[in-house]
Amino acid sequence: MSNKFYITTPIYYPNAEPHLGHVYTTICADVLARFHRLVGDETFLLTGTDEHGVKMDRTAAEKGVEPCQLADRVSGVFKSLWQELDITHDDFIRTSSPRHHKCVQAIISRLLANEDIYLGTYEGWYDEGQEEFVTETEARTRNYIAFNGKPLAQFSEPSYFFRLTKYADRLLDFLNSHPEFILPQERFNEVVSKLKAGVQDLSISRATLKWGIPFPNDPEHVVYVWIDALSNYISALDYGTDNDARFRQFWPADLHLIGKEILWFHAVYWPCILLSLGEPLPRQIFAHGWWLSGGRKMSKTEGNFIGIEKLREAAGAYGMDTLRYYLLRTASFGSDLNWFDAELARSFTELSNTIGNCLNRVLKMVFKYRGGVLPTREPDALLLPVDYALMNQTQALFPALQTAYAACQLHQCALLPVELARSINVYIEAAAPFKLARDPAKAGRLDTVLNITTQGIYTAMAGLLPVLPHKAIEGLSQLGVQANGRKLEQLALPLADGHVLTEGTPLFQRSTTGYNLP
């Protein structure tokens, strides 16, 4: 019986078109989802757009359109881009959709019934870029500067509040007993430290803003920011409706994948809301690092980001799978990353010279010496230490990948199969099959080399399916294996003696299209 795996991206703010940061998070989530489907888990990948709030209202006014028109247009760009990138999401939630409205109002009603919402007045500092109310202490710590480098704004108006303070100690107890709840470890430490310093009740409504979901008990107020945005993870599962089978099937989420700038909201606000609702907390939150430019986080606000067209140029020159590989292998998952053109080119060369070259060499050898038919290797007693070393590395790949995926070590998920191919190339050089082929007495040894190397590159290509979904399928096809619909346990079985391979063409070929990224 398969397990379930529910993974989410953040829902993205559609006040401007997507950029590298959005693409990175979504591709990482797609890689994880593809792996879990490959192992047979019942997998659900959710993404979407967060369409309410002051930024959307102001951006729409600047463009001379209604907020709903801006949301429709830019949300459409996100959906189209995910299709272009072959993201395998199972749902795309929009916070302006009727299903999300109904869910949020049901949540507010339940929080009101629990007496966890009250009417008060918010007075203090406000970070408009993050749409976050900031305490005086934190404002002072920040030197009254917002997340995007602009001055914090002073703000005062009636507001409904969620009793965050009521659940803070319960959450802290939970975190202390579940250190795996937030990854990486330094992010966990940050949240616990800040939580111990104390929290204030959370302002959750605006009376001066009309672009939002009306409060069910007071339509003069709209639900503001974080209850609206965070609820997407269960509104997409039909929470609060009479037909919530999908919620009961997939909740709690197995992984909320986010950028570290929104960790506090996911690691504190969201769990406390769920505690009030009496629902299980997500199993894990992973806050990855930022893409940097000039030492600063890439962002729409800063204008220092790599946008869609630049990414299309990269994919056009090197292939979409190379772009996916580069994004994953650049740094340990969770660390900040820097974009370098030379590193993207190096990733292509690495794939071409290692994976592509290994596959090409193995296929040519088997076709040249055995007519494209996989020979039977010699008995174990005749194998050499180098044979066992490569066979052991081959057999260890899938268990190592399962460990890496479970720990969200996505850089290892990309690198481990490539390292296997690198070892195969080294083995081929040492075994010198072209010399073995000259001596009929060494036919058995040649069969062993051909069998071990074919099994190795087959395993490496299968291990790359979540990372290089197109090139891995193409490579497996050249090995005479149709991967579509097959699970990892099937692909983990070695190729049968006598298996027929298929002659192919080089996997990685550089486009002649120009490439010019900043």
Image: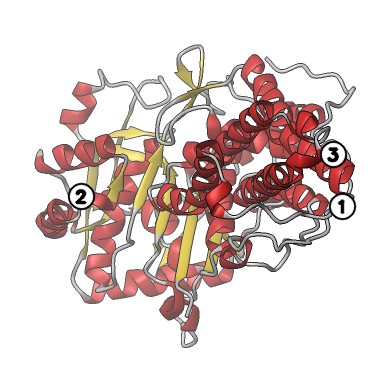
In the picture as drawn, the residue positioned furthest to the bottom comes out as 242
Q: Are marks 3 and 1 in contact (CB under 8 Å)?
A: no
Query: Residue at label 2?
Result: 179
Picture quarter containing residue 280?
bottom left
Query: Which of pointers 2 and 1 lies earlier in the amino acid sequence?
Result: 2
Residue type (three-letter) at the residue carrying disc 3: Lys
Mark 1 residue crowding within 10 angstroms, few (<14) / some (14–19) / many (20+): some
- Determine whether, in the image, residue 259 is placed left or right of residue 474: left
Query: Residue at label 1?
Result: 502
Structure colour scheme: secondary structure
Picture quarter containing residue 425?
top right
Q: Are marks 2 and 1 in contact (CB under 8 Å)?
A: no
Pick whichever, 432 or 28, lies toward us.
Answer: 432
Query: Residue at label 3?
Result: 364
Picture quarter containing residue 516?
top right
Residue type (three-letter) at the residue carrying disc 2: Pro
User: What quarter of the picture does the C terminus occupy?
Assistant: top right
Q: Position of residue 84 (x, y in %)?
A: 76, 47
The residues bearing labels 3 and 2 have C-alpha atoms spaced at a distance of: 50 Å
The residues bearing labels 2 and 1 have C-alpha atoms spaced at a distance of: 49 Å
Residue mark closest to the camera, 3 vs 2: 3
Q: Position of residue 172 (x, y in %)?
A: 13, 52
Q: Position of residue 274 (x, y in %)?
A: 28, 66
Pick whichever, 510 or 383, lies toward us.
Answer: 383
